[in-house]
Amino acid sequence: MKLRCLIIDDEPLAQRVLEKYIAELSGLELVSKCGDALEAIEVLKEETIDLIFLDINMPRLNGINFLKTLKNPPLIIITSAYTEYAVESYELNVLDYLKKPFAFQRFLQAIQKAEERLKLQEQQEEVKGDMEYIFVKANKKTINISLDSIQYIEALGDYVKIYTDTEHIVTYQSLKGIEKLLPTQKFYRVHKSYIVALAKIKSIEGNMVHMNNNTLPIGNNYKQGFLQKIHIN
């Protein structure tokens, strides 16, 4: 599985260097390049990103302030010509800090850190795969939801609606946030607005996935990963 990468940098030369380095490694996939953080926010709404290469000095919104806006950030590697932000960035749990200009060898070291971090996350996912339930807040209560009862989850702005075999529950949570609670062996995001329980899928037809009583769209940006997930090439 390739690491899906996003470059956020207002300097075209810096973008080209990163794009070249990413192309050198078969384990990386460049999803998009953004000239500023506001543009990147829109990309993150549409795409699943594993790793961001983030510049700091950018117009409209600098990299540090952008990072503070992310509720559940992917892995972050800072790429900056300045070192004065290093301490603050590490307090925000960035993976590495590359001072421009940096050689491919230094870039490779950062990627190896990313791979190690993801390996640890995968081990944590294996533990999470043994989970049988999650707790969510709804109607001023904390509700226990059996994972086996969930059919799919729909994004509704700042809320999500969880459809189970017997009811639906609305909770204040982002779709990306609740996605991180779910074991990836059992659930997959098929669209910017939908996560499905793999065991509840009845059939797949074109860009649609048929559940028990509902048909949901498969987003173009999610289709390839979804088909790989269910071992359909």
Image: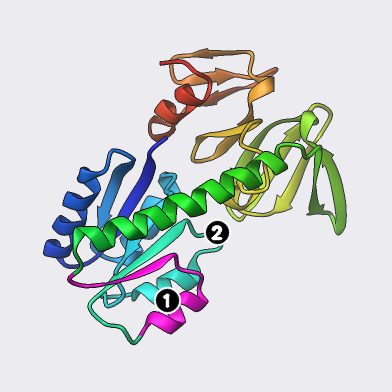
Q: Which corner quadrant holds the N terminus? A: top left
Q: Based on the picture, tell me whether residue 113 belongs to the magenta stretch.
A: no
Residue 42 shows in this picture: no
**Picture coordinates of residue 202, whole percent (x, y):** 64, 13
Which numbered dot is residue 156?
none
Residue under circle 1? 65
- Residue under the image location 34 percent in, 49 percent down: 5
In the rendered structure, the answer to whether residue 55 lies left or right of residue 72 reads left
Which numbered dot is residue 72?
2
**Picture coordinates of residue 73, whole percent (x, y):** 50, 60
Which residue is more in the foreground, 64 or 140? 64
Which residue is more in the foreground, 61 or 82? 82
- Residue under the image location 84 percent in, 28 percent down: 166
Give SS at disc 2. Answer: loop
In the rendered structure, the answer to whether residue 120 lies left or right of residue 41 reads right
What amino acid type should be assigned to the residue bearing mark 2? Answer: Asn
**Picture coordinates of residue 150, whole percent (x, y):** 74, 32
Give SS at disc 1. Answer: helix
Q: In this view, does 176 lie above or below 14?
A: above
Magenta region, residue range = 85-101
Q: In which quarter of the image is residue 67?
A: bottom left
Which residue is more in the foreground, 47 or 49? 49
